Amino acid sequence: MPNRRDSRRRADPRDLEDDGPPRSAAAVLFGHQVTGPNGGKMHDDRATRLKERIHRAHEQGPALVMGIVNVTPDSFSDGGRFEQAEQAVEHGLRLAAEGADILDIGGESTRPGAQPVGIEEELARVIPVIERLSRQCDVPISIDTSKPEVMRAAVSAGAAMINDVNGLRAPGAVATAAELAVPVCLMHMQGEPRTMQARPSYQDVVSDVRDFLLERAEVCQRAGLDRANLVLDPGFGFGKTLEHNLALLNALDELARIGFPVLAGLSRKSMLGRITGRERPDQRLAASLAVALIAAQKGAAILRVHDVAETVDVVKVWNATREVSSR
């Protein structure tokens, strides 16, 4: 069986030349014409292919690996390491070369206690990175944002997916996502980043999260979003205690059976530090790989991770055992 990762063009981290003039974030935001660097048809094709791959991963496996590119000074795991566009692009190309199926670009930290970022600042962080990555590699790009203005500009710049930790609850977000017609991940979060870990409380965390996600999916479909474009994320670490997170991980197969692909974002999370005693996020590789494997086995279609190469190896080994057992 051919390896789907080995057959595509590899990105080269040295390939950092910018082949077009930069556009200001203000021009993107305040109504100037925005044309994606690859043209509308290529963008549509990328979004369609990505939707098909997500559903294939959901229905048949193996899970897709989404590499994290934080263009922020304050993310919990790698804040400040890739704050400059050139550093972020180089990191994205490295993750693509390591086998990432999707690159998730974020310009606003959502760690506990994080302060909000303005629209212009977020655009200035992410748009140059998306433009250059979409030109320099063929790995589809996801924009990690809750702001409709950033969603629109990012898709125009080449993004093929929206990843919203706020579940499209911002004013105008549902309508914008429906118009853009790309895959959208809806995440559950109790509260908001500044206060979400203060006192998380649920009647039944699995039922409460499932009901929230199904309600958001219904709202989106009523607004015109294609059901086939929806992905659900239980939001590990977003307004949850360690016990809540473990209950959700244990029940991930239940969430994967409700009819939508599931994204699992567990990489380097504080819950892993609590379990292992590893205080620094970059010391949690082994624990991150363990929960990635558990999530994949329980039906996650997308694994959102910092350590792409290692996670790709985990998925390859797990998939090899699946193929042998299915013969």
Image (cartoon, rainbow, N blue to C red):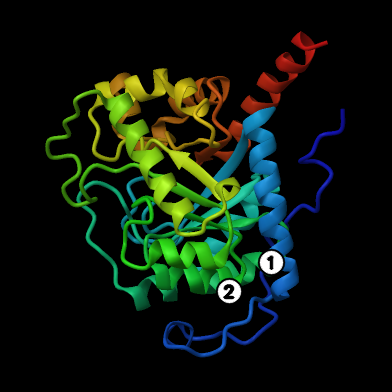
* Circles 2, 1 touching at the beta carbon (< 8 Å): no
Amino acid on which the number 2 mark rests in the picture: Ser
**In the image, residue 188 lies at what x, y percent?**
34, 42
Which residue corresponds to the image point at 40% horizontal and 23% vertical from the top-left?
A: 249
Which numbered marker is on residue 192? none
On the rendered image, what quadrant is the C terminus found in? top right
Quadrant hosting residue 140: bottom right
The span from disc 2 to disc 1 (Cα, nearest Å) is: 8 Å
Which residue corresponds to the image point at 69% horizontal and 66% vertical from the top-left?
A: 43
Q: Is residue 238 above or below residue 177?
A: above
From the viewer's side, name the closer residue of 201 and 3: 201
User: On the image, numbered disc 2 is attached to which residue?
Assistant: 156
Report whether 49 appears left or right of 95.
right
**In the image, residue 227 lies at what x, y percent?**
55, 47
Amino acid on which the number 1 mark rests in the picture: His
On the rendered image, what quadrant is the N terminus found in? top right
Q: Which residue ends up furthest to the right in the rendered image?
A: 1
Which residue corresponds to the image point at 38% horizontal and 61% vertical from the top-left?
A: 72
Tell me the SS state at disc 1.
helix
Q: Which residue ends up furthest to the front in the rendered image?
A: 222
From the viewer's side, name the closer residue of 90 and 132: 132
Q: Is residue 168 above or below residue 211?
A: below
User: On the image, numbered disc 1 is attached to which residue?
Assistant: 43
Report crowding for label 1: few under 14, some 14 to 19, many 20 or more residues within 10 A (C-alpha): many
Q: Earlier in the sequence, mark 2 or mark 1?
A: 1
**In the image, residue 263 lies at what x, y percent?**
50, 38
Q: Is residue 118 above or below residue 168?
A: below
**In the image, residue 31 lies at what x, y percent?**
47, 88
Tell me the SS state at disc 2.
helix
From the viewer's side, name the closer residue of 125 and 297: 297
Quadrant hosting residue 255: top left
